[in-house]
Image (cartoon, rainbow, N blue to C red):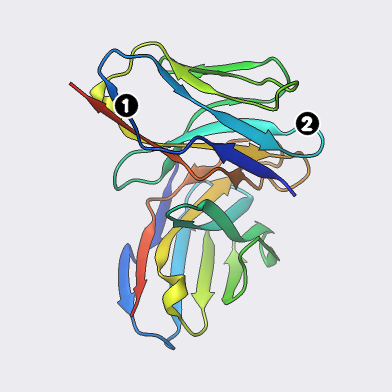
């Protein structure tokens, strides 16, 4: 079945540091890939997505590139801020599956001054 | 923000009692989903709906039932709550199948004593 593997957290960075959160997936066919973010006490919100190989999703300074050859969708940001502290989830959805999402376990990011 | 509300937001109940959680949307989206969020597991799909009275099971459906009698409401019922069902429950909606974004509600924290 489908699965998503994320790097274990928590990740602790100083403000303005470079961020990478690794995500790899297993799925048949050509899934769409997503990064969701969850701020404390809130629901999840979409951060970015990519729907085909080599697509790059980007939003709020975050980027991720759909790499089919390595089945990866790593999240990056060049300079993190304290306000980026949250839990980040990688997820996939396959066409024809009613948009059902398969999530990774989440990676907590803590950014300090 | 997508118009999704969940009620109640917090609930404490005892083992063996029935519990119903409600998800209400004002977006007229076709698809609705119930997930549970647990440490180390990310979000896992319980049940989903692809239309009024059309529902199907997700990966962790045992012990849960759902109903959707109108587009805007999706109910999740625990017929006889157990301590293993202590979790945070999220409702989500999506407009179409495929790579479309899911919008999440604020969550319901359920504690079963």
Please say whether residue B88 is visible from this viewpoint.
Answer: yes
- Compared with B61, B15 (above or below) is below
Task: Using residue A24 as the reference point, say whether residue B92 is left or right of it.
Answer: left
Give neighbour class at mark 1: few <14, some 14-19, many 20+ (Cα, 10 Å): some
Please say whether residue B71 is visible from this viewpoint.
Answer: no
Q: Which of B86 and A41 is in front in this view?
A: B86
Q: What element carries label 1?
A: helix
Where residue A30 is drawn, which disc sits there?
2
Q: To which quarter of the image does residue B98 belong?
A: top right
State the residue lying farthest toward the bottom: B16
The x and y percentages for residue B25 are 48, 53
Q: Which residue is drawn at 68% across and 20% down?
A: A67
Q: Nearer the viewer, residue B87 or B4?
A: B87
Task: Using residue B27 as the reference point, say whether residue B100 is left or right of it.
Answer: right
So how many labels did they put on this image? 2
Q: Mark 1 points at which residue?
A: A84
Q: Residue at x 66, y 44 (%)?
A: A3
Quadrant where the image shows the C terminus of chain B:
bottom left
The x and y percentages for residue B106 are 37, 51
State the residue lying farthest toward the left: A113
Q: Which residue is drawn at 71% across and 45% down?
A: A2
Quadrant where the image shows the N terminus of chain B:
top left
């Amino acid at each position: 079945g489908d699965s998503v593997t994320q790097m274990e957290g928590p990740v602790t960075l100083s403000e303005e540091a470079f961020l990478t959160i690794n995500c790899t997936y297993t799925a048949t066919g050509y899934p769409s890939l997503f990064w969701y973010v969850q701020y404390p006490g809130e629901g999840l919100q979409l951060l970015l997505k990519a729907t085909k190989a080599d697509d790059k999703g980007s939003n709020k300074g975050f980027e991720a590139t759909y790499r089919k050859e390595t089945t990866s969708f790593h999240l990056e940001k060049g300079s993190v801020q304290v306000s980026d502290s949250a839990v980040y989830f990688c997820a996939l959805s396959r066409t024809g599956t009613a948009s059902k999402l398969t999530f990774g376990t989440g990676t907590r990011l803590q950014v300090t001054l | 923000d997508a118009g999704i509300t969940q009620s109640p937001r917090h609930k404490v109940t005892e083992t063996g009692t029935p519990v119903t959680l409600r998800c209400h949307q004002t977006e007229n989206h076709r698809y609705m989903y119930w997930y549970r969020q647990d440490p180390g597991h990310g979000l896992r799909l319980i049940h989903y709906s692809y239309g009024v009275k059309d529902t199907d099971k997700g990966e962790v459906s045992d012990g849960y039932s759902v109903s959707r009698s109108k587009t805007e409401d999706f109910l999740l019922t625990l017929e006889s709550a157990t301590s293993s069902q202590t979790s945070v429950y999220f409702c989500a909606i999506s407009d179409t199948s495929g790579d479309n974004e899911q919008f999440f509600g604020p969550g319901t924290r359920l504690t079963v004593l």
